Image: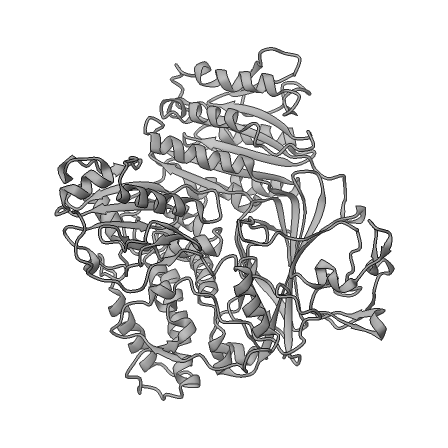
Amino acid sequence: MYSQPVYEQPQAPTAYTQPVYGQAPMQQMTQQFGSMGLSSAPIASPPVSLMGVPPFIADLYAPPPPIRLPANASITDSPFANADPSYMCSTVNAMPSSEALLKKSRIPLALVLAPYRTVHDGDNEVPVMTDAVISRCRRCRTYINPFVTFIEGGQRWKCNMCFLLNDVPAAFDFDTQTQQPADRWKRAELNYSCVEFVAPTEYMVRPPQAPAYVFVLDVSYSAVQSGMLATAARTILDALERIPDGEKRTKVAFITVDKSLHFYNLNPELTEPQMLVMSDTDDVYLPQPTHLLVSLSESKAVISALLEKLPEMFKDTLIVNNALGSALQAAYQLVSTHGGKIICLQSTLPNVGTGALKPREDVKLLGTAKETTLLNSASPFYKSFAVDCSRSQVACDMFIFGGQYSDVATLSCLPHYTGGQTYFYPGFNASRSEDAFKFAHEFSELLAEHIGLEAVIRIRASRGLRMSAFHGNFFIRSTDLLALPNVPRNQSYCVEVAIEDDIKTPTVCFQTALLHTTCFGERRIRVITLCLPVTNSMSELYSSVHQQAVVTYLANKGVERALSSKLDDARDAIVNKLIDMVGVYKTHVLGSAQGTLTQLTVPENMKLLPALAFALIKHDALRQTSQIPTDLRSNAMNLLRTMPMQLLMPFIYPNFYSLHNMPPEAGEVSSTGVVFPPTLNLTSEKLEPHGCYLLETGQTLYLLVGRGVVPQLCVDLFDTKSYEGLRAGKITMPVVDTSLNKKVNLLIAKIREMRRGNYYPQLYLIKEDGDPSLRLWFLSHLLEDRTENVMSYQQFLQHIKDKVGSNSYK
């Protein structure tokens, strides 16, 4: 038998339900009843000592502190009246009553949003209001929601933001379908925090935009040789039926680019597409006025013919140049009139024409203060072009394939300012099935996404509150209006909040309004409302801290500081914020004087914040090292500031499991889902010579096999006779008719499908005495250990304790 004695069982195995993201209805109901005043009065969170004990990883996905609203804060008793944290949450679940209290607390005040997240099994669908009755405050334009109050016999409603009295529309109590009086208390906008209104014509400046996709495909030597072009063409061909086209309005176009631009006449009356070549890339124009951007449904046959032929057309190319900037300008001319999406697939660094770039990777700068210059854009063209795109409702997605330096920092400007997404495939080679499958999966999922089009986001808040800074992929059109030509599913945004006046009310509200066009031609407004109690107690404020929202804020601020200053400053800012919060808690909640600290203590709800902050400064995006290429670091930064919180947590703090001594129920399906093994702390102390371990970051999966592993495990798990027969590197798990293999394949499959987003984590097999670089890559995720010149977790806690003890927090 391959099973070894169980060396540690830190917790009972549990079904992986991700409680922090997408609450189950019962959990949501419990929280809501607590917020309706049915629970006991707010109680200070008990203090927890951190020194000398490992991080409490069993609670990493525990729900945030409950939102304890006063009785009757909402006008209905719906358990869904307040925002689910997966749509909108705050760094604190109780609002400080004044700017002075917030400043004294040193707690960051911010919102974390994912307003257009996908709905998974078990989630509630977003209610859609189709009767065109949209009641808004005349003064502040807040949408009616569960936290307004009705007066004068229900004839008027008082705005919960600015307190103005507004008339209730006559049609509010009438059902247009049955032509009968209706029960207003059953209206979705009074019962659900997240609702969607079908917008009438006054919310449109033009008819709803039809989806339009322009594919800009690199056909230079590296794109062909790596297999990118062939894989991309096959993926688009296979995904044609998945591209949203319910109204038969979707349009597509193709531009291929090397040193020249190639357009394609896709007239549906043709049996074969016609290529039109433009060799002069300095003065870009469209070679013909029609049939370059065509109806997907009408021209599907000729589009399919083009995709079948594309790889063959360029298979013998020797051209190593690429004029991406000129191709982007041409794509813009195709869709700028009505808006659309430009999808770039780039293998060669753009090196001729507009927006030409030069290789600028300089290993001597890595790990130094000057590394920041490599992490910022090298050319103003890409930002200015992105701003033009945003103005014309054109979004850009970038798929970057790095055989060598790709300048992700510059090319990702396009998605950053247009609401798009960047995908990076370092060392891509389609002859490795793992590379081809990852790209094909992510590309296909992106094409099938039911995105929002020509969107704007505005966040309103109660009197005395103001949105002060915004982080994410969009362009800020005015002081508080975020412009997104394209709203991807599951993209996250972080918004800093300032308190301008003392808050005299018992509650405050935030309301996010997302005005967008669906893929199916309907103009809609998605409205999400969050209500929080107000407190003047420092203890209650600290007991309400949402540690995952705080670390999301710190990730965004860390990336911002790294790009505007230097990486050292980013890490220092994160550590200093943690020191401040722990120090204020010690002084003003526990009542300890300066220098009297014998323990490092935080409230129960913040007990993982030091570990998460520590993981952040050791993350590929921010850590002190000269070993991370700038493309990889830039990509990690892009992910940190766009991932939804549910996906961000393992990306910052990976999940680590032992497979060789799993409990019998692990890897099986129970009534609550797939049962995962107990999570292990991220330290090499957990590694046994005969062990087999799985570590996952949401982006990558690692299987570590110890050199002392018993041969039977190799047979059962990998269908290989011994450890020596295992092949390290990217692998596809074999399918073997054994219990262990079925369990591990089920765990891997569940990890790949359970989180929101298009990402497909690749699997790496790491042998303990195999490729040193692979092993070091794996070990760098064991965050509690000391690595290179970065302290261990316990040393970090001692550093925090020393700093807290020497500072004064008045």
Taking the spot 47% from the left edge, 75% from the top edge, the residue there is 106
* x then y, percent, for residue 572: 36, 65
In the displayed structure image, the side of residue 150 where residue 745 appears, left or right: left
What's the residue at 63%, 11% (across, down)? 270
| Vertical order, 97 against 481 (above or below) | below
Q: Is residue 791 left or right of residue 485?
A: left
Q: 253 or 325: which is nearer to us?
A: 253
Q: Can residue 278 be seen in this view?
A: no
Image point (52%, 59%), residue name: 24
Query: Toward the viewer: 727 or 299?
Result: 727
Residue 394 in picture, x, y percent from top left: 62, 38
On screen, residue 181 above or below 795: above
Residue furthest toward the top?
Answer: 271
Q: Position of residue 517 (x, y in %)?
A: 68, 43
Q: According to the image, what is the colour scheme of the structure?
A: one colour
Residue 656 sits above or below residue 423 on the image: below
Foreground residue, 437 or 222?
437
Indicate the quadrant where residue 115 lies: bottom right
